[in-house]
Image (tube, coloured by chain):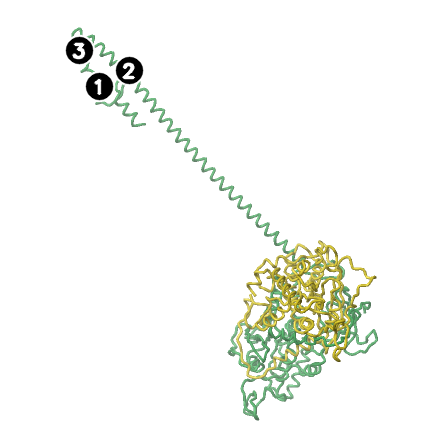
Amino acid sequence: MHGWNCPHSYFITRTSDYSIKTRNRCVLGGGGGRESVVSACDMKCGITYFKTAGIVLSSLHVLAYLNLPIICKGEGCRTVPLAGHVGFDSLPDQLVNQSISQGFCFNILCVGETGLGKSTLMDTLFNTKFEGEPATHTQPGVQLQSNTYDLQESNVGLKLTIVSTVGFGDQINKEDSYRPIVEFIDAQFEAYLQEELKIRRLLHNYHDSRIHACLYFIAPTGHSLKSLDLVTMKKLDSKVNVIPIIAKSDAISKSELTKFKIKITSELVSNGVQIYQFPMDDEAVAEVNGTMNAHLPFAVIGSTEELKIGNKMVKVRQYPWGTVQVENEAHCDFVKLREMLIRVNMEDLREQTHSRHYELYRRCKLEEMGFKDTDPDSKPFSLQETYEAKRNEFLGELQKKEEEMRQMFVQRVKEKEAELKEAEKELHEKFDRLKKLHQDEKKKLEDKKKSLDDEVNAFKQRKTAAELLQSQGSQAGGSQTLKRDKEKKKTREEKSISDGTCTTPGKHPVVPCALVVCAV
Amino acid sequence: MDPLRQSPSRSSSRASSPRTLPCEMLGYVGIEAVLDQLKIKAMKMGFEFNIMVVGQSGLGKSTMVNTLFKSKMWKSTMPGLGVPTPQTLQLQSVTHVIEESGVKLKLTVTDTPGFGDQINNDKCWDPILGYINEQYEHYLQEEILITRQRHIPDTRVHCCVYFVPPTGHWLRPLDIEFLQRLCRTVNVVPVIARADSLTIEEREAFRHRIQENLKTHGIEVYPQKCFDEDINDKILNSKIRERIPFAVVGADREHIVNGRCVLGRKTKWGIIEVENMAHCEFPLLRDLLIRSHLQDLKDITHNVHYENYRIFRLNESHVLPRGPGWVNLAPAPASVPAPAGPQANPGPPKVGGWAKDNSDEEC
């Protein structure tokens, strides 16, 4: 194996739910068994590859999947003896107190056909009556119903979310039945990922909605798994901790049950479905978990009816031929399920969800988005850099759009201006024309006025000349002639006035004056 | 916005938190077994704690660390002729694993020899700030990897113990500058060092003056007022806040007093017992740091200081980080100043809200 010159050595235990086959013989010279000492560098030293049984893994992957303690046994850290009681053995209590004040969160997904007793089992598990009505068989598609409940036990507050499939297995064409479930699980991961990637985030206050455990209800046919079950479990096993259980198991007799269980496990193994195995790396619970693993899948019965047997109330299902006690280990595996699910492994389920399923989802999603991580040979990109590049791209696009808009705007303004200028020009021309007309008219009228004035002057001259002549003539003898002339003139004037025509200029001063006055 | 660690069942900080219905359980289910599961898991994983001691040389920092953890973490430095005072501030870290009753603690102590020892102490806090930010940076780099470790090794400084020399007067300008800059980046616990040179009355007066100084300059030391979540915490922390800064004496030699073997300093006029509350306040410091608030220190570092740093870093995206094997486009700043951005933004009091008016309004 590579990487032996590293000062840090980790103990890696082979977990049964991950298919690393580490070589049992230890190169350093130690026992075989479940533990092999392999050398892996931590991040500070760099990345080493080590080859185990033909699988090349980077230490990163190994560290990510296995549960390594912080305290490494190696040269890096020395153990110092204490000379007295320091007091940090209260640390676990401090941690627990902090967790209590924060509260716990647990999300269960129940997948199974309608009528298999999902809601009843939840009621029985948590010893309470969750509200809800039984669903009908006429749903057009598979839907998921999610309800959240606040449970309190002594000083522990639990926020329990129960998600149930409605209409699973009721359709005629069940090809896409698994899809809404997978989408729902992905949506919860996505929400968490979004929160984690935010700049301002509130992760400690975040209500974790990721599914921690998926209980898959198998119909108690007694034969084997249905193909729908196989397909659905195969799709779910990489996304969530799948725990298959045989529902309504009081319909199967004991001998049939053992055969059924064996058939189910063999089918699951042959199809490569990875169901959740209870963890065995902790000595305190390894034994219990080990025996429980052998009993998978659990055959359970759910019931909320109670009957007094002996001197206490037990949950039962009553039949004419007998009474099935839910909490009797000889009758069904309900107690085992409750032990495993709640009392022993709740924390482990949550941890697996976070560190395995969520990390897998996160990795796939980020790689899909175009982020790459460290590669041994090529220059690695950083998340930051890719973010940067994308952001710049986006900003560039925005700027381009802005430019376009600005140009369009400028264009429009120009057009409008041109139009307005045209209109203005027209108006000017019109104005000029009118002005010219007006000037012509004025000129004409002024000419007329002038000519009229001339006539008036001429008339006045002749009038004075005539008066002179008459005064000379009258001296000789004829004021009559003067009078006659005057009369003649008068009659001629009157005649011309009554005619109203101006035949000769200078004879009719009155009328042209009137004309001039009107025009002006 | 909700305070930091409110239980999610009371009110939701996110708009999309589901509507929850309280349910009565009719019998014992066994949910509280999850606490045991947590404990087992924690014991198996082990704990980490990183502490930094800052102060001028000769104030008894190394001795204090040895006394706190009752082991020879550091060799207590005695001024010898052959040991030159370092010209620049250097940070020295040492890591030990200590175990008690099955609980393993990986303790990292960072010492700062040379702090405040020069004639011109301008910007002597820069290397310290740089170191703290560097640890945040490491953690951030680990966190944003695509394939990341299950448990990211935590080297961030959880607590910084600042040793104030026992002048008996006020905080010196160096102290004030340092505390102002650091209280926003890390949890600071100031202590009066070598308190056996002050009488009890002098200690009280000194303590009051220091508290006034801290208040005038807006320095929030640990336990910070705005992070008290409920009334019990408030009461407990107010009691602690009254006694900050603790007047401590460190000793790593044992003497016989009244037939008992105690840690103490022997002088001609008597033996100063370190663990005697009448003599000095070392037990208070020890209880605060180890027995009651260790997890709290780590939580505040993770949820507040680290988040502040992260916001600052992710907003400031034009400075690319420098990490192992990365394309080095621009060097990271050697000493990142205390982030100015988060202070200006109004927001939840714990994340980003360090401005004075914020803490007054929302605490």
Q: Is residue B157 above or below residue A410?
A: below
* Chain A color in figure: green
Q: Identify the residue position indicated by label 2 in the image.
A: A458
Q: Tell me which numbered mark, 1 or 2, is placed earlier along the sequence.
A: 2
Q: In this view, does B349 lie above or below A122?
A: above
* Residue A104 visible in the snapshot: no
Rendering quarter of residue B213:
bottom right
Q: Position of residue B332 (x, y in %)?
A: 70, 56
Instruction: Characterize the local packing of mark 2: few (<14), some (14-19) or many (20 or more) Cα atoms within 10 angstroms.
Output: some
Marks 1 & 2, CB-CB < 8 Å contact: no
Q: Quadrant of the C terminus of chain B?
A: bottom right
Q: Which residue is drawn at 58% across and 60% down?
A: B356
Instruction: Characterize the local packing of mark 1: few (<14), some (14-19) or many (20 or more) Cα atoms within 10 angstroms.
Output: some
Q: Identify the residue position indicated by label 3 in the image.
A: A481
Judging depth in this view, the residue of A119 and B200 nearest the camera is B200
Q: Residue at x 19, y 14 (%)?
A: A486
Q: Any mark on residue B305, and which?
A: none
* Chain B color in figure: yellow
Judging depth in this view, the residue of A243 and B27 nearest the camera is B27
Rendering quarter of residue B6:
bottom right
Q: Where is residue A38 in the image (x, y as percent from the top left)?
A: 79, 72
Q: Where is residue A453 in the image (x, y as percent from the top left)?
A: 30, 19
Judging depth in this view, the residue of B54 and B195 nearest the camera is B195
The residue under label 2 is which amino acid type? Ala
- Spatial separation of the CA atoms under disc 2 and disc 3: 23 Å
Q: Position of residue A115 (x, y in %)?
A: 55, 80
The residue under label 1 is which amino acid type? Glu
Q: Identify the residue position indicated by label 1 in the image.
A: A493
